[in-house]
């Protein structure tokens, strides 16, 4: 086993029982293999989540791959049905947020309510000491348990894990957090796992291979509205403001146009008025309604359980893989809210998305953009 997997070495006691969430992919497969090699009592668990009946999803094939990995590693396999929880906490939440004009983050909610919610609770009730997942993140023990960014900058997933609390984090392993993706695949080959060359899953299983707008139309009725220029002139129409996201350049109709028109991008929207605002400017020329340096957040979670110092400079990101941006934090006007003040203007700030705060490589937590 690679001596780089410090996330395991920090928690003493061989033969502790670990339930590994197996997705049928290479990352969770290698996580199970590394734990087994180090001497833990490992059980593989496939979590069944909800999906609409009309959407094609490969969950049966993924479950079979998870079972084969368990057979190869000679570890027990269990099924966990969290369909009801997923439907309520992830899918219904997503539709509700879109309907209100916000941009949801179902991956964050899945981690909070399913992987580190329902799965963790069930595993502990079953007698497990820990759970493990194939996330690219690290855990550092100490007086306060810290969550650190994964070593692989291209794969770091702490942006989606900011809702984890101290009480939950003490029961969590991230076995591949100190590895880069090519190393993970190399280890999978060493263990002769059938998932070694399996492609990474993309997007939400319940959406399937369709555009998000087409999927949403199955649950949110079409509602024709106006497309406005930056000057407020009506220049076209759309099917419903809640189908669209900032920066999008397709899916709406421009009726007032000339042969010389440039492509137009959505720079603002108002779901209550059912309007979109578009611009033909690009790059740094664009001034979106949603651009700014100060961002209010709510539904805040600080992983340490304590609010960070308000006198210190931190870093944050407002979308996955965005380079970290320097910022400071201050308390908001309402109780339980905070304001993150960036050094530079942030583009296309999307209400409903996550803003995650870092102190170097440590993920401190975050909140939902108001």
Image (spheres, rainbow, N blue to C red):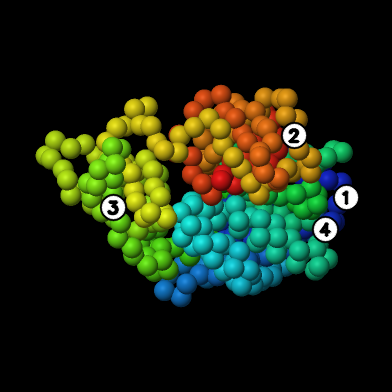
> In the drawing, does residue 213 fall left or right of residue 181?
left
Mark 1–mark 4 CB contact (< 8 Å) = yes
Comes first in the chain, label 1 or label 2: 1
| Image coords of residue 234 (percent x, y) | 24, 47
Query: Could you give the CA–CA distance between mark 3 and mark 2, rounded to whole angstroms?
Result: 44 Å
At horizontal 51% and vertical 46% (from top left) the residue drawn is 351
Q: Nearer the viewer, residue 233 or 324?
A: 233
Q: Quadrant of residue 43?
A: bottom right
Q: Which numbered tag is attached to residue 226?
A: 3
At horizontal 47% and vertical 72% (from top left) the residue drawn is 52
Comes first in the chain, label 4 or label 3: 4
At mark 3, the secondary structure is: strand
Comes first in the chain, label 1 or label 4: 1
Depth check, mark 1 against mark 4: the one in front is 4
At mark 2, the secondary structure is: loop
Residue 127 vertical position relative to residue 131 in the rendered view, above or below: below
Please give the residue where the numbered disc 2 appears in the rendered image. 308
At mark 4, the secondary structure is: loop
| Image coords of residue 174 (percent x, y) | 70, 47
């Amino acid at each position: 086993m690679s001596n780089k997997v410090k996330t395991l070495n920090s928690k003493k006691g061989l033969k502790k029982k670990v339930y590994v969430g197996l997705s049928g992919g290479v990352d969770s497969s290698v996580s199970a293999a590394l734990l087994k090699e180090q001497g833990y009592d490992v059980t593989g668990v496939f979590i069944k989540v909800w999906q609409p009946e009309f959407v094609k999803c490969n969950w049966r094939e993924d479950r079979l791959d998870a079972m084969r990995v368990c057979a190869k590693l000679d570890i027990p396999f269990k099924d966990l049905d969290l369909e009801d929880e997923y439907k309520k906490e992830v899918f219904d939440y997503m539709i509700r947020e879109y309907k209100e004009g916000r941009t949801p983050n179902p991956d964050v909610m899945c981690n909070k309510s399913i992987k580190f919610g329902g799965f963790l609770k069930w595993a502990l009730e079953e007698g497990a000491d820990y759970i493990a997942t194939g996330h690219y993140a690290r855990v550092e023990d100490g007086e306060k348990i810290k969550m650190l960014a994964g070593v692989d900058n291209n794969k770091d997933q702490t942006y989606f894990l900011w809702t984890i609390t101290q009480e939950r984090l003490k029961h969590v392993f991230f076995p591949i957090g100190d590895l880069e993706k090519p190393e993970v695949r190399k280890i999978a080959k060493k263990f002769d796992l059938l998932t070694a060359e399996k492609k990474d899953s993309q997007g939400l299983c319940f959406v399937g291979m369709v555009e998000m707008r087409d999927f949403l139309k199955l649950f949110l009725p079409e509602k024709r509205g106006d497309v406005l220029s930056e000057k407020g002139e009506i220049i076209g129409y759309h099917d419903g403001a809640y189908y669209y996201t900032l920066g999008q350049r397709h899916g709406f109709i421009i009726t007032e146009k000339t042969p010389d028109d440039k492509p137009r991008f959505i720079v603002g929207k108002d779901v209550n008025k059912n309007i979109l605002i578009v611009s033909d400017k690009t790059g740094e020329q664009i001034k979106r309604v949603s651009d700014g340096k100060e961002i209010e957040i709510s539904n805040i979670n600080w992983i340490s359980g304590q609010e960070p110092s308000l006198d210190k400079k931190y870093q944050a990101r407002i979308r996955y893989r965005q380079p970290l941006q320097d910022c400071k934090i201050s308390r908001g006007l309402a109780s339980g809210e905070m304001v993150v003040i960036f050094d530079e203007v942030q583009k296309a700030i999307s209400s409903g998305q996550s803003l995650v705060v870092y102190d170097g490589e440590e993920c401190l937590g975050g909140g939902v953009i108001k």
